[in-house]
Amino acid sequence: MGKILIVDDDASFVGALKDKIHALYPLLDVVTCTEPLLALTILRQGKVDLLLVDLEMPTLDGSKIFSYAVSVGMDKNRIVILSGRDSDYLHEQFPMGTCLAVLNKYEAKQKAVLDMIFSSMQRKAAAG
């Protein structure tokens, strides 16, 4: 357990998040995708333990990628929706139980939730 797919058209955000994960959680394998359509191929192949997907992207938005991931067998509780929008809007779009979490990617308190998720994955990867 430990493969994370990050799908976000913001290359600087993706790069910073990938660098952070590599530095703090070295047992986790991070795959990044700044082109949403390419993410579909990766998801179809399976073997993704956690999907982090931006809600607002050109070509294909995060809600469509979410639906596709679930349709090819990914557990909805292994998907985190990221966005720059406020949390009230996000929770309207994705009510509790729809996915693992819906987070504003720029709020520090929300980033702490990601750290808890990554930390849990790191512990599981270390255990075997």
Image (cartoon, helix red, strand yellow):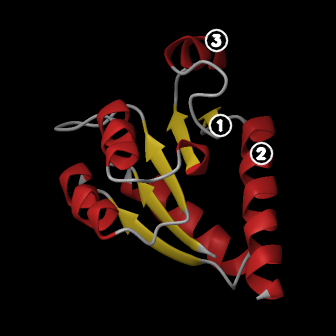
Label 2 Cα crowd, 10 Å radius (few <14 / some 14-19 / many 20+) = some
Q: Which residue is depicted at the point 55% across and 65% down? A: 49
Task: Give the amino acid at mark 3.
Answer: Asp
Query: In this view of the protein, which residue sits in the foreground, 9 or 37?
Result: 37
Q: Which residue is depicted at the point 69% across and 85% down? A: 27
Where is residue 76 shown, x and y percent of the image?
53, 42
Looking at the rendered structure, which numbered label has been put on residue 113?
2
Where is residue 42 shown, x and y percent of the image?
30, 66
Q: Which residue is depicted at the point 37% across and 48% down? A: 69
Query: In this view of the protein, which residue sits in the foreground, 95 or 81?
Result: 95
Q: Are marks 2 and 1 in contact (CB under 8 Å)?
A: yes
- Mark 2: which secondary structure? helix
Q: Which residue is mark 1?
A: 101
In the image: residue 94, left or right of residue 62: right
Q: Which residue is depicted at the point 61% across and 45% down? A: 77
Label 1 Cα crowd, 10 Å radius (few <14 / some 14-19 / many 20+) = many
In the image: residue 2, left or right of residue 67: right
- Mark 1: which secondary structure? strand
Q: Which residue is mark 3?
A: 88
**Label 3 – label 2 distance at C-alpha:** 16 Å
Mark nearest the camera among 1 and 3 is 1
**Label 2 – label 1 distance at C-alpha:** 8 Å
User: Is 34 drawn above or below residue 60 in the view shown?
Assistant: below
Task: Give the amino acid at mark 1.
Answer: Ala
Task: Give the amino acid at mark 2.
Answer: Val
